[in-house]
């Protein structure tokens, strides 16, 4: 979905000044915006507004942002981008584990936020199609044929390496925690075996990155997890 489609963005933020700034900037880029000053108000407005994306502050006056994410995830897969002055690793991991799609720390630049919004909306739109091909820069993943190419040349991956890459591709543009990747690739009984991720991520990067020491396709989000980049991401 692009801005010209008039995507609907629900802003749940208790600071009136921030609500005005976000409403004005998002509106000027073609988005339809609804705002709420509390978590409950946002949860009540979301169904009628039919949000395509939610921008959520964690520090709300009536309930925690984590609780809002949990309630939203119980009824919808709408992308959620967290906006918060909290920048500890624990805050980020908690928000992502409960179901947030991305995390932007205040203060943030509006251009960065708009880029994250575009990525989240593109990923959501792609998930509703049957197109089995993922492309980003030199990387192509044919999910139907389980074939991976870099610059048109097939790359041979082990089953585990492919499972890790396809898990990242399923949520391309968003951060996936190490715990989430462990459970998707190795199973629900895993969650603390971080060395699994480190070993296989190193192997995978050697096969798909031009410079594995300075990866451009699979970025590390320090203390949180990994993000498979998309063509238009900053």
Image (cartoon, rainbow, N blue to C red):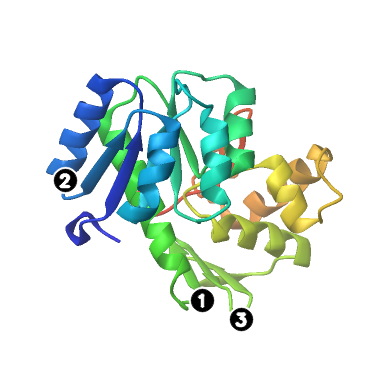
Q: Give the spatial CA distance, label 1 vs label 2.
A: 30 Å
State which mark lies toward you, 1 or 2: 2
| Circle on res. 132 | 1
Q: Please identify the residue farthest to the right as the structure is shown.
A: 189
Q: Where is residue 30 shown, x and y percent of the image?
A: 16, 50
Q: Name the residue under label 3.
A: 145
The answer to whether residue 124 is left or right of residue 36 is right
Mark 2 neighbour density, 10 Å: few (under 14) some (14–19) many (20 or more):
few
The answer to whether residue 113 is left or right of residue 196 is left
Mark 1 neighbour density, 10 Å: few (under 14) some (14–19) many (20 or more):
few
Examine the rendered structure and indicate whether residue 67 appears above or below residue 115: above
* Frontmost residue, 108 versus 45: 45
* Frontmost residue, 134 versus 109: 109
Q: Give the spatial CA distance, label 1 vs label 3.
A: 9 Å
Which comes before the other along the chain, label 1 or label 2? 2
* Frontmost residue, 230 versus 49: 49
The answer to whether residue 226 is left or right of residue 134 is right
Which comes before the other along the chain, label 1 or label 3? 1
Which comes before the other along the chain, label 3 or label 2? 2
For residue 227, what is the image quadrant? top right
Q: Mark 2 points at which residue?
A: 29
Secondary structure state at the residue bearing disc 2: loop
Is label 1 in contact with label 3 (beta carbons under 8 Å)?
Answer: yes
Q: Give the spatial CA distance, label 3 vs label 2.
A: 38 Å
| Circle on res. 11 | none
Task: Give the residue drawn at x 26%, y 28%.
Answer: 19
């Amino acid at each position: 979905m692009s801005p010209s489609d008039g995507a609907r963005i629900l802003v749940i933020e208790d600071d009136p000044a921030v609500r005005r700034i976000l409403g004005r900037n998002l509106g000027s880029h073609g988005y339809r915006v609804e705002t709420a000053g509390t978590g409950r108000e946002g949860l009540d407005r979301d169904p009628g507004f039919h949000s395509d994306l939610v921008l959520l502050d964690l520090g709300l006056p009536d309930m925690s942002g984590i609780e809002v994410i949990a309630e939203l995830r119980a009824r919808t897969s709408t992308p959620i981008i967290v906006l918060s002055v909290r920048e500890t690793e624990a805050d980020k991991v908690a928000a992502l584990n409960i179901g947030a799609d991305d995390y932007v720390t205040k203060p943030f630049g509006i251009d960065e936020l708009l880029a994250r919004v575009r990525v989240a909306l593109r990923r959501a739109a792609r998930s509703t199609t049957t197109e089995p091909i993922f492309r980003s820069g030199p990387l192509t993943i044919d999910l139907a044929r389980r074939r991976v190419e870099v610059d048109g040349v097939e790359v041979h991956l082990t089953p585990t390496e492919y499972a890790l890459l396809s898990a990242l591709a399923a949520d391309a543009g968003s951060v996936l925690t190490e715990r989430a990747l462990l459970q998707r690739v190795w199973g629900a009984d895993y969650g603390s075996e971080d060395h699994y991720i480190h070993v296989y991520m190193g192997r995978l990067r050697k096969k798909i990155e031009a410079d594995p020491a300075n990866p451009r396709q699979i970025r590390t989000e320090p203390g949180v997890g990994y993000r498979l980049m998309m063509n238009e991401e900053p």
